[in-house]
Image: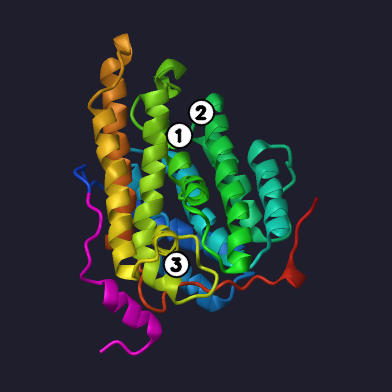
Amino acid sequence: MPSTPEEQLYARFADLPRPSYPFEDLVNPAMEDLVQECSRWIDDDYGFHSEKARSRHKQHRLTDIAARGFPYLTLPELRPVARFASSGAMLDDYFDHADHGEMGAIRKRIMALLSGAETVAPQDLGIYRQFQLIRQDARLCGMPEHLYRKFVIVIGTLLAGFQDEKRYIARNQPAPLPVLEVIRAETSGGLPFAKYLCMQKDYRALPDEVLEHPIVLRLHLLASRMIGWHNDIISLPKELSRKGDVINLVITLQHEHGVSIEDAYRMAVDFHDRDLDEFITLQDNLPVFGKWQRMAQEYVTDLGAMLQGVYSWHIKNSSRYRPGAYVEPEYASSEFVWRA
């Protein structure tokens, strides 16, 4: 029988419906190699975390998000996006108690490292070195500069979303639904993943007339929204058990509609499924792209497989969403280290 409040919450939602996708569920053969690499990254650069936090983050297998989302990349091509996925998740955990202003300073520092504006190797928190290494990895694997710039821009919007969350976390108050929709599309990590998908197969050859078309951009946004929604649904028990974890679709829907948490949960699944229906309709009705038509169609097909891969990490590989598995934030303002 469940004993802790968190265990009781996980049991309470265990039999409710979850999202599902009609897309291929694939795994990159380099997945286990990446897990070993990530363990070394944590050992090398996360000494500011406690031993307990480092151990739990290793168990979360955060690089599996990339290995499942990008099944056709080589190991060198996987490293930038895997380092982004793992570092982004651990940053979110560690700085959970940072305030809006502090998160803004963290965002500016990381963007300086990703853009190359700051070139000296960071000597403070190792998480900054990990973000600087994303730039190095991208160059080593031959990522075209224009694609790297697009990738970095949406990492910037993700960090801005982390900053915007802090206003609501500090007040322990759910964000209004229109605000939440913007924030979760930014913070889910789906937009950087969608941009990075161009590194798979021959998609880096696709011109902007394809990649910047409104329908393709809408597919990027829908994929990112759905990653946010399925994360909110799966992580709900953890968030209900912790004060301040209010950036969640289910919690916002319950707050705005005055319904039970179970009814809000079902509303969230319906909310997700409307996005999925739109995503599939757009996949099946691409514009005319001329000589790029076949490649564009394959690209949006792989966008669906990317979405499936991220979801599969949540439900198959990760030990992150189990009772007692979350890494509690260890950050305190008095320990805040950054360089303006």
- Spatial CA distance of label 2 from label 1 is 7 Å
Q: Residue at x 34, y 45 (%)?
A: 69
Please name which of the two marks, 3 or 1, marks the residue nearer to the observer: 1
Q: Say which residue label 3 marks.
A: 58
- Vertical position of residue 82 compared to residue 191: above or below: below
In the image, 76 versus 214, the foreground residue is 214
**Label 2 sits on what residue type?**
Leu
Where is residue 52? Give x, y as percent. Answer: 51, 78
Which of label 2 and label 1 is nearer to you? 1
Q: Which residue appears at 56% of the width and 26% of the height?
A: 145
Residue 30, how many percent across, how many down? Answer: 34, 49
Q: Which of marks 2 and 1 is nearer the N terminus?
A: 2
Asked if the residue under mark 1 is in contact with the one under mark 2, i.e. CB atoms within 8 Å, the reply is: yes
Answer few, some or many: residues within 10 Å of disc 1's Cα (few below 14, many 20 plus, some between 14 and 19). Answer: many
Residue type beneath disc 1: Lys
Rendering coords of residue 76 (x, y %) = 44, 41
- Does label 2 or label 3 sit earlier along the sequence? 3
Is disc 3 in contact with disc 1, using a CB cutoff of under 8 Å? no
Residue that mark 1 sits on: 195
Decide whether residue 15 is among the magenta residues.
yes
Measure the C-alpha gap from mark 2 to mark 3.
Answer: 30 Å
What quarter of the picture does the N terminus occupy? bottom left
Distance from Cα at disc 3 to Cα at disc 1: 26 Å
Residue receiving disc 2: 147
Nearest the camera: 195 or 212?
A: 212
Residue depicted at x 32% and y 44%: 307
Of pointers 3 and 1, the one earlier in the residue sequence: 3
Crowding at dot 2, Cα within 10 Å, few <14 / some 14-19 / many 20+, comes out as some
User: Is residue 83 in view?
Assistant: no
The part of the chain drawn in magenta is: 1-20
